[in-house]
Image: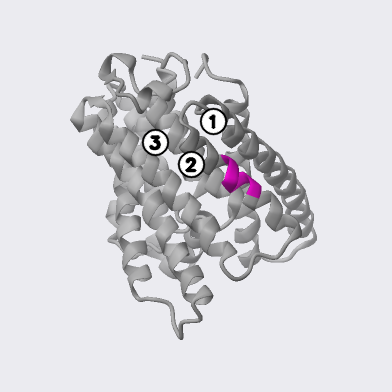
Amino acid sequence: MKQWPIFWRWLTVAALLEWLIGRTLTRSAIFMPKTPFMISSYQVLGTVGQVAITMTSLLALISILWIAWQERRNITFALLLITSVACSLTFIFVLPDGWWPVIDRMLLVAISTVLLGRLWRAAGDRRRQLILTIPVLAVWLGALYHWLPALAQALQLPEVPALGRTLFNIGEILVAFTPIGLWLLLRPRERIRVYALATIPAILFSIMHLIAPALVSMLVIWSIGLTLYLPWPLYALSLWLGMLAISSALKRDEAIGWGLLLLLAAGYAPQVSTHVFISLSALWLMLAGQPVEQTKCTSSFQSQPQIHAVT
């Protein structure tokens, strides 16, 4: 990441602050006693969260526009990104109704489809491509999940197709397996102390889930959009191995680590444009940052930005 523009680091930090403070701590304060100290703390957290979401929104727009510029030789992909940004900015002033939400969500489906196709058209390590397919498909399914209700409303159907729930559940499975797959890909060789420290979030999650499963499920839905319908040990394992993968990737300054952090901050099946842009930026970063020696570019990849990935 040292060879990438500095705003990528700023975006990651701002997105993590917005996620942890704006969408997690402030919402969990609903269940805490409303003492004067807690009220003051809540107001401070709210202010910090508002600053974080403002910075995140601005940096997310910059990242998408920067990607579009880097992809200017791939005119179709660049136009998809620019159109998505234009729709997002337009919807600030104009209420999206009718077919506009359908078009907006379809743009996300198209962008993630292009990324998926680019990943598999590139010659290289098939094992790496298979593992990176997992998060791309998760974003793709999340986009389809939101696209179906918009389409049903535009067509004035009596109810939303039941297929949407199935797509959502499959996507959540992929989300749970994404950190596990990245851990298998990176195969971090860390000290036992690092492995032990990485278990702390997983242990805390397990204890809280066993004590108050309904409360934890509600907080997780608010925080990252997961319903926790899968067995809780899978989420704990994913959290543990995800911490190890992030730690190893950041030590080696690999783009995959930063991409995984951005995906966590964006959440699953995001509804807000800012979080959608973060997830797209994360996918592009993870795909564009794969080692050069593992990527013999096809004509599609030759339109990639001339940035040397960190090995």
Q: Amino acid at mark 3?
A: Met
Name the residue rendered at 33%, 18% in the picture: 291
Q: For the residues carrying marks 1 and 3, which lies nearer the camera in this image?
A: 1
Asked if labels 3 and 1 touch by Cβ distance under 8 angstroms, the answer is: no
Say few, some or many: other residues with alpha carbon within 10 Å of mark 2 (under 14 / 14 to 19 / 20 or more): many
Asked if labels 2 and 1 touch by Cβ distance under 8 angstroms, the answer is: yes
Asked if labels 3 and 2 touch by Cβ distance under 8 angstroms, the answer is: no
- Residue extent of the magenta highlight: 82-86
Disc 3 element: helix
Query: Residue 67: which numbered mark, if any?
Result: 1
Quadrant in the rendering for residue 297: top left
Q: Which residue is mark 3?
A: 243
Q: Amino acid at mark 1?
A: Ile
Q: CA distance from mark 1 to mark 3?
A: 27 Å
Quadrant in the rendering for residue 9: top right
The percent position of residue 133, horizontal first and vertical second, equals 29, 41
**Residue nearest the observer in this picture, 87 or 182:** 87
Can residue 36 be seen here?
Answer: yes
Q: Amino acid at mark 2?
A: Leu
